[in-house]
Amino acid sequence: MAGVNYTFATEIAANTTVFRVEGFAANVADFIAISGDLGFSKVGGDIIAIGESVDASLEAGNAAYIRLTDASFGLALGADGTTAFELKNGSFKAAIDGLAGVTADEVIVQYTNATTSVAADTTLDIVDLSYTFSEEIQADTVAFAVKGFAANVADFVTLSGDLGFSKVGTDIVAVGNNVSASLEATDSLYASLNSADFGLIVGATRTSFELSNGTFDARLDALGGASAENVLVQYTNADGAVTAGEAIGVADINYTFATEIAANTTVFRVEGFAANVADFIAISGDLGFSKVGGDIIAIGESVDASLEAGNAAYIRLTDASFGLALGADGTTAFELKNGSFEAAIDGLAAVTADEVIVQYTNATTSVSAGTTLDVVDLSYTFSEEIQADTVAFAVKGFAANVADFVTLSGDLGFSKVGTDIVAVGNNVSASLEATDALIRQPELGRFRPDRRGDPHQL
């Protein structure tokens, strides 16, 4: 044709059959956006496509996204309406407000429609390109699967586990059922929730997640045998409020936020916490944990501390305020105060106290008066200085009637020795009162109930 020219810009090898599409881009059923360079071909009545540096992304606005980049890609479109594609062996990238250091061990993106399944090891070939579906894919699969997901959440907890991501409306959602959240100061000082159910919602400016129904694991220095009845981990940013009953799902995994979560929530709540402290006391109650710098702290508002000698003899501080500080450098301190005093000692009736305080520090820890701990909306202040190596169950204004014999009064310090509870005081009174005139023995020495419950003066 006169006036029409064509120049082959690049060399073409012999036996070349290429339908190459550069800068291909498509949205897949409100699931993901795909982009990259693809080679197309026709095999029988089907169309196939392969790419070696293809991207898949879930986007929630301009700043929030989940991406698999530079991935291998295989697509099969059947004349009978079947559709399947997969991306793998790429690089994982994520931008989620509040989550830093996001990584993954493996990411795979899969899609099949309702009439399509793919057998393991199915291979597509286009000239010198090849793609193999290494795993079976069931029909009606829509998966952005992230194995070995890990992230640091606002210096609060570290998340890890296997997640499935999807797009719901304008939000990215993720669910998992074997996910962990941990507060870790060192390898030997931590609190974690493992094997938990997980739900995450990410909007253009929103981040909300929760873990529940997991297993509590903790190593908390002197607090041995730590256990819990229920643990809940929650995080929301300024736009992340969650309504009760909000439900999300990816494939056949679902998550429901059972309760309302306010904006700007950072909670590692442990209900029914229980631990024994260095053969000193047993602690139980509901605690809120957090990480401050490299340290773990915990606060509770209705916590119990008890010294037990068998089933019937005990000294207890109940419904107390509690503050705990565990340092990465090995420091440990806790205190309970402002609770109710209870005692069951055979022979002693009408036991009361003016003030009870329980304190513990290890050999390397002292606490300055006025030191304050904060966990979200909870706060605890150590009102008095605590010296290093303190182990104290201090009862001020102790008073009891001893078998209609004498009335005891004074300030006592209680402890556990073997299976016995012991108490000492150096300004204690015992009085026999017939009238207003008293017969009094001042400064009674040491007192304990033995295993039979009989009182003994030592």
Image: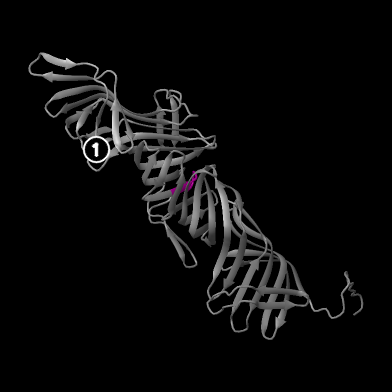
Task: Decide if residue 351 is on the left or right side of residue 228.
Answer: left
Q: How is the image coloured?
A: one colour
Residue type, numbered disc 1 = Arg
Residue closest to the eye, 140 or 387? 387
Task: Decide if residue 99 is on the left or right side of residue 10.
Answer: left
Task: Please give the name of the residue rendered at 29% of the width and 34% of the height, measured from the top-left corner.
Answer: 421
Residue 241 x %, y %: 44, 48
Residue 110 x %, y %: 59, 69
Task: Please give the name of the residue rendered at 64% of the width and 77% of the height, measured from the top-left corner.
Answer: 121
Query: In the picture shown, does residue 439 fall above or below 132?
Result: above
Query: In the picture shown, does residue 320 fall above or below 199?
Result: above
Q: Which segment is the magenta one?
A: 233-241
Residue 184 x %, y %: 52, 43
Q: Quadrant of residue 74?
A: bottom right
Task: Please give the name of the residue rendered at 45% of the width and 49% of the height, measured from the top-left corner.
Answer: 217
Task: Decide if residue 114 is on the left or right side of residue 440.
Answer: right
Q: Quadrant of residue 432?
A: top left
Residue closest to the eye, 306 or 374? 306
User: The N terminus is located in which quarter?
Assistant: bottom right
Query: In the picture shown, does residue 427 fall above or below 81?
Result: above
Residue 229 x %, y %: 36, 50
Question: Which residue is the extreme one toward the right?
Answer: 2
Question: Which residue is the extreme one toward the bottom?
Answer: 44
Was residue 25 drawn as part of the magenta stretch in this picture? no
Was residue 235 drawn as part of the magenta stretch in this picture? yes
Question: Which residue is the extreme one toward the left?
Answer: 435
Query: In the picture shown, does residue 297 fall above or below 228?
Result: above
User: The C terminus is located in which quarter?
Assistant: top left
Q: Specify whether residue 241 is in view.
A: no
Residue matched to label 1:
451
